[in-house]
Image (cartoon, rainbow, N blue to C red):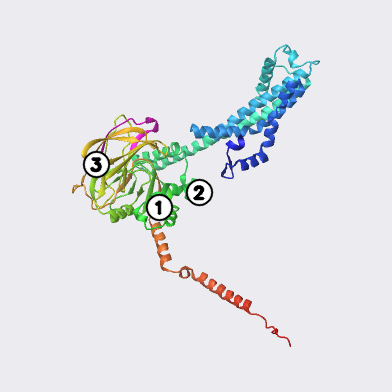
Amino acid sequence: ARTTKFALMKDGAVMTSPREFRRLYIDSEFKSDLLSAIPLSTVAYNVGIRGYAYGMLRFFQLMRISRFRKYMESVEETLEMRMNVMLSTAFMRVLQMFFGVILLCHWFACIFHFIGTSSKDSPNWLATEDSTQENMSVRYLRAFYWALYTVSTVGYGSVPVVSIVERVFAMFAMIVGAVICDAGITAVLTSAISSKDHQAGTNSRRVQCSKRFMGSYCIDENLQERVLDYYAYADTELRNIDEKEVLCDLSSSLRSEILQHFCFQSLRSSFLLEALSDGAVTSLVNRMEPYMAIPGENLSEIGKECAALYVLQRGLMSAADEAGCSVDLPFGVLIGHLVTKAVERREGRLTIGVEIDILMATGLKTKYGNPYAIIRCGTKTCRSSIKKGKEWRDNILIKLPDQCNCCDELKIDVKGWRKEPLHADIGSTKVSLLDAAGQVKVVMLRDSNGKRSGVLKLKVRKYRLQEHEQVSNTEFTVTAQGYCHLYRMETYEINIIRQCLARGQKESIWDRLPRCFEDEIKHKQINEKDRVRQSWRRPSRPCLSLHPD
C-alpha cells in the first residue's frame, strides 16, 4: 500500500511513480521496517516461550524508534497545512526532548524491574518493598517512578536501591539523566529564551535609540509617533522579516518566479508596455524590488514627477484625480504617471461616468472575512470599502473614456478580507449598463461552482460627466491609507530596455560588438581561412596510367 498510495519528495521533485518509490524505499528504510514488522515475539508467545527469551525478541520492535523524528515532522507539517498552526523550532525541540525523557524512563524502568526479578536469592528492591506478590503493572509503576525521579535528578529516594548491581545501574541512570535533563533540556530552554530576549532586546534598543535621537533634535511629536508606530508594525505584523533579504537569499530563478507571480500580469496588461515582447517584460519584472509605503505617503502626485512604477501587492491605497474624485485601488494595479498617460493616449479623455451605490448585501458568508467588492468596467478597475458591520453602504464613481467599447457591463467580484495576501472569493456577478438610469437593482452572487453565495442591492447610473467632474490632467495622487507592500521599479529601466531593442533592430550583430571583440573575431577568421587552405593543399603524386604498356 505504501508504494502505490504515498508520494515522496526527493531532491526537490515529487516522486509518484510506484517503481521509483519502491526502489528508493527498499534501499533506505525497508530493512528496518521489515525487521520491526516481523511478529517474532507474538509467534514466541503463542509457542509458549516466556521469560528473558520472549523479552529479547521484543527488542526487534525498538527499530521503529528511528522513525520518531519523522513522525514529529509529519505532525508539524499536518498542523501547519490543515490547521494553520505554526510551531516554532524551540517548541519542537522541547517536545522531542520531553518524549525522549519519557522513553528513556520507560527503558530504565524495565531494566530496573529486570534486575529486581533476576536476583531472587539476594536482597533487592522488590523484596525490600514487599512487592514480590504485587502484579506486574504495580511493580512497573514503582520502577517507572524510580526511573523518573532518578533521570530528572530530583532524587526523592522512596524506592530503595539495595544490591550492588542496582547501585551501579542507579549511578549510570544519574549520569545519563544529568546529561539529558540538566544539560540538554536546560540548553534548549536557554537557547529559546535567549533568542527571544535577543530579538526583544534589539527591538527595545532600536526604539530607545530612536526616542533619544528624536528627542534631542526636537522632532515633531506627530512624526515621532509615526516612527514608533512603524517599529511596532515591523515587530508585531512583519515579525522583523525583511522581504529584500528573503529574496536575496533565493536563487535567481526562484526570485524571478516570485516577481513574475506578483508583477508580470500587471506589466503585461498595461498599455505602457504593450509594444514589448514577453521576454522584455520579464526583464523589467526581474528589476523590481520590494517596497513598503507608510500611512499617508504619496507614491505619485498631480503635477509632480513620478520616477518609478509600483505594483500593489497588499494594503489599502487610494487614488484621487484633479477633480477630487477618489477611488480605492485593488491588488495588482500598476501605479505611475507613465501608466495614466499611456491610457490617455490610447483611449482619450474621460467623459463618461458610472456611479455605483452599494445599498445592502445579504447572505454573504462571514467565515471568509469582511467582504469587499472589486468592480471592473472596461479597462478601469477599482475597489469598494470593506464591510465591517451589518450595513454596507458605499458610493463609487468610475470615469471612462467615450471611445471605450467595453463599457456596457459591470463585473463585480466580492471577496473576503483577511490578513493573508490571498483573499477568499465569495461570489461574482455582472450588471448591464445599457439601462442604467439610477434605478435600484438586486443582483445574485454566484460562486465558482455556480451556487448562490449572496445578494447585492445596487443603484447604478451611467451618465456624461459634468464640466466640473472632467479633468484635463489624467494624473492621480496615490496615497497609502495604511502600511502597503508594493514592488517598485525605476522608469529609466523601461528606457534602457527600449534602447536595447531599438539598437537590435537597426544595427547588425557585427556593429553591436565592442571594438576589442571585433578585432579578435577578425583575427580568428583569418586563422581559420589559412587552416582551411592548408588542409586542401595535396602533395604532388605521380599519375598512374590505367592503360597497359
Q: Nearer the N terminus, badge 1 or badge 2?
A: 2
Give the labeled residue for mark 3: 355
Q: Quadrant of the N terminus?
A: top right
Q: Which mark is residue 254?
A: 2
Q: Is disc 1 in contact with disc 2, using a CB cutoff of under 8 Å?
A: no
Q: Secondary structure at mark 3?
A: strand
Answer few, some or many: residues within 10 Å of disc 2's Cα (few below 14, many 20 plus, some between 14 and 19): few
Q: Residues within 10 Å of mark 1 (few under 14, many from 20)?
A: many
Q: Which residue is mark 1?
A: 489
Q: Amino acid at mark 3?
A: Glu
Q: Amino acid at mark 2?
A: Leu
User: Between marks 3 and 1, how big is the CA–CA gap?
Assistant: 33 Å
Stretch of the chain drawn in magenta: 354-372
Tag 1, which secondary structure? strand
Instruction: Nearest to the eye among marks 3 and 1: give it.
Output: 3
Amino acid type indicated by mark 1: Met
* Mark before the other along the chain sequence, 2 or 3: 2
| Residue reaching furthest to the right | 121
Relative to residue 85, is residue 245 depicted above or below? Answer: below
